[in-house]
Image (spheres, helix red, strand yellow):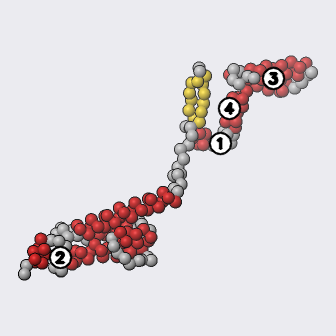
Amino acid sequence: MKVADLQQFVHSLIAPIQGAGGSQTIVKDLQATVEGLRPFAEQKIADFNKLLATLQRFNGMKPAEFTKFLDTLIVEMDRGEIVVKQRQRASSRKPKQTPEEKARQSEEKVKQAAQRVQELRVKSLDPDFSYSAVDQEKATLNKLTAKELNAVARELDITQSFKKKDAALQALENYVKDLREQHDRGSFRPEHSPATTAAATQP
C-alpha cells in the first residue's frame, strides 16, 4: 500500500462532508492533507510511517538540537529514490577489558618498568649522569599500583615487600642510587672485570 492510496481515501471524504453541510474548516483541513501527501504519493505506507516517527523527534526540539541532529543525517540515492539515513554514533566508551587482559597489561607494565630501572642503574655510572633522571623515572613509576611496584622490585631481586607505594618507590630509587654511591666511594668492583680477574690470579 502506498501513500497515494491514503491520499485518495482522504480526498474521497471531502465530497460527502460537503454534501452533508459539514464544517468548511474540516473540508479545508482534508484538502490540505491531500496536498501535503502529494510529494510522498509513491512511497510505501511503512516507509512513510518511519518518516513520521523521525519527524516526531523534532517536536519541541530546540534549534541548536535540531541543527545537531541534521548533521547526523546522510542523504543517499537508492534506485533513483532519495534515502535519508542517520549516522550511527561512535561509542565513546572503550571496550571493557577482561580480567585476563588486565593481568597481561599489568605484567607488561611491570616488565617495562623493571627494564627501565635496570638501565637507569647502569647509566648511573656514567660521569655525566644526573639524579634528575631518577626523579623523572620515579614520577613515571608512581603511576603504577603498589602491587605492580612490588612486582617491579621482585623483578630486580629486591626481596622486601612494601605495603605502601612511597616505600616501594624509595626502594627502587635506592636501587639506582646505591650503585652510583658505591662507585663514588670507590668500593664498587664490577664482577668479572679484567682488573678483578688479574688481581685474583696473582700469587
Location of mark 4 (residue): 51
> Is 106 rendered above or below residue 36?
below
Q: Which mark is residue 189?
A: 2
Looking at marks 3 and 1 on the same chain, the residue that comes earlier in the sequence is marked by 3
Q: Which mark is residue 178?
A: none
Location of mark 3 (residue): 10
Looking at marks 2 and 3 on the same chain, the residue that comes earlier in the sequence is marked by 3
Looking at marks 4 and 2 on the same chain, the residue that comes earlier in the sequence is marked by 4
Q: How many C-alpha atoms fall within 10 Å of the one at disc 2: few (<14), some, or many (≥20)?
A: few
Which residue is at the front of the view, 144 or 11? 144
Which residue is at the front of the view, 101 or 67? 101
Which residue is at the front of the view, 197 or 86? 197
Calculate the distance from the C-alpha at mark 4 to the C-alpha at mark 3: 19 Å
Calculate the distance from the C-alpha at mark 4 to the C-alpha at mark 1: 16 Å
Q: Nearer the viewer, mark 2 or mark 1?
A: 2
Q: Which mark is residue 61?
A: 1
Which amino acid, by three-letter code, is at mark 4?
A: Leu
Tell me where residue 183 appears, x and y as whole percent: 19, 76
Q: Is residue 101 left or right of residue 132?
A: right
Looking at marks 4 and 1 on the same chain, the residue that comes earlier in the sequence is marked by 4
Tell me where residue 168 appears, x and y as whole percent: 38, 74
Which amino acid, by three-letter code, is at mark 2?
A: Arg
Calculate the distance from the C-alpha at mark 4 to the C-alpha at mark 2: 83 Å
Residue at horizontal 7%, vertical 78%?
202
Residue at horizontal 18%, vertical 68%?
126
Calculate the distance from the C-alpha at mark 3 to the C-alpha at mark 1: 30 Å
Q: Secondary structure at mark 4?
A: helix
Which quadrant of the rendered structure holds the N terminus? top right
Most extreme residue toward the right is 20
Q: Secondary structure at mark 2?
A: loop
